[in-house]
Amino acid sequence: MGMKYEYVIVGAGIAGLTMAERIANVLNKKVLVIEKRNHIGGNIFDSYNEDGILIHNYGPHIFHTNDKGVYDYLSQFTAWRDFWHRVLTCVDGNMIPMPITLETINQLYNTNFTGEEMEAFLKERAEDIPEVKTSKDVVLSKAGEEIYQKFFENYTKKQWGLDPALIDTAVISRIPVRFNRDTRYFADKYQGMPKHGYTKMCEAMVANPNIKLLLNTDYKEVIDDIEYDKLIYTGPTDYFYDYKYGKMAYRSLDFVFETYDEEEYQPAPVVNYPNDYDYTRITEFKKLTGQKHAKTTIMKEFPKSEGEPYYPYPTKEYKEQFAKYREEMDKETKVFFLGRLAEYRYYNIDAVVRSALDLFERISK
Ligand code: FAD
Ligand code: UDP
């Protein structure tokens, strides 16, 4: 066949699309993007369902960042619906704010503490753990056993299929403890939803004739027929190396959608269910997107170990396994690995975009 591209990108998620956009618009070079799904956007893809409600096909995505460069970059391709994400968690049959804030503690214990009183209250319960090594240690050392059990232990077991004592500190550290009434899920300076959705934003990123998209294609089906100087790979690294150091485990999810003939389903965009049911959380999309509609669509997330790879496992064992792949990756001269799957990193959108922008700077020099 003999196609030639200076740049080839595997994967049309936000990592691959950011690279494609930069190469096409800044370098004015042709770039081929190969994507095995039938759409662009990767896991941030959203679409209208049969009732005309905008849903996130791969789980609720809220953009948030402190990185002004990333915010400004994406703002070239979308306007924003400024929005602060809020989450309630269902504990002992009551829906109370998550993360752990003054509101959470006062509602849980029916108290009227001030921030200082809350701090003293948790300090009394917190365990003295000299070296905080796991996600379990993180909560026990900040808030003690009862908070751990009510809010974290079972949610984490459901989400990961692992005891929090086996999981890296970084995972539960995503959830802060605040001694004030700030009940926002994220405290980042820039937060919001792309005004017309993530897919529209992604379409604007690739609206350059320099970018060729090859959908419905696993890169291995075609790569031997393509000549390239640089390959940017955003798929799973174990697959790239034909599993030579074994299969990397990823946590997967079943997304179950339900549409109700009512305007509203629940009091917050996301409600967590740490201790009840087999799903971890329910998302009501209209509460994220601001869409007005007589019906409403919700989604339940059921974690599982097999299926589409979504989350890299945050354990010592898998990090050690990945380190073997990392050694191979570091030896490559014309292949660059980027994104959640390729780098086996629990990345948010903003961090992926940041990595892509930095990689572009490096390879375009
Ligand atoms: P992906 O989006 O996974 O893109 C990789 C692409 O490569 C995919 O389209 C895949 O089909 C393609 N591909 C893989 N293998 C091949 C192959 N062999 N050939 C061709 N193509 C291939 N982040 C936030 O900032 N805020 C949130 O609220 C948030 N919520 C999330 C909720 C869930 C349930 C999940 C799973 C993630 C969430 N994230 C969130 C993280 C966010 O989804 C990721 O950071 C981001 O989408 C990663 O982009 P990526 O391009 O690295 O990977
Ligand atoms: N977590 C928990 N209880 C909750 C929310 C989160 O135990 O109510 C833990 C769980 O281990 C989860 C991690 O904190 O995997 C990070 O939560 P986050 O909401 O950031 O997860 P994501 O949206 O990335 O799935």
Image (spheres, rainbow, N blue to C red):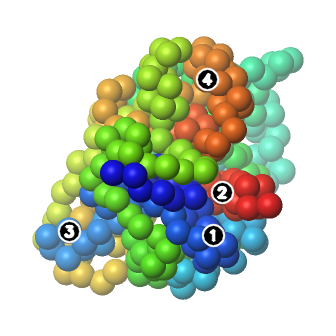
Residue named by callout 3: 49
Residue named by callout 2: 356
Q: Nearer the viewer, residue 38 or 201?
A: 38
Q: Mark 4 or mark 3: which comes first in sequence?
A: 3
Query: Which quadrant is home to the C terminus?
Result: bottom right
Q: Nearer the viewer, residue 53 or 44?
A: 44
**Residue 220: where, in percent of width, then height?**
37, 38
**Residue 309: where, in percent of width, then height?**
40, 36
- Label 2 element class: helix
Classify mark 3: residues with Cα within 10 Å, few (<14), some (14-19) or many (20+). Answer: some
Q: Nearer the viewer, residue 222 or 258?
A: 222
Label 4 with label 3: CB-CB less than 8 Å: no
User: Where is 108 relative to 57, above or below?
Assistant: above
Which labelled disc corresponds to residue 157?
A: none
Residue type, numbered disc 1: Arg
Which labelled disc corresponds to residue 22?
A: 1
Classify mark 1: residues with Cα within 10 Å, few (<14), some (14-19) or many (20+). Answer: some
Q: Which callout, 4 or 3, points to the residue nearer the camera? A: 4
Tell whether 151 sits left or right of 239.
right
User: Where is 314 relative to 107, above or below?
Assistant: above
Q: Mark 1 or mark 3: which comes first in sequence?
A: 1
Label 4 with label 2: CB-CB less than 8 Å: no
Residue named by callout 4: 325
- Label 1 element class: helix
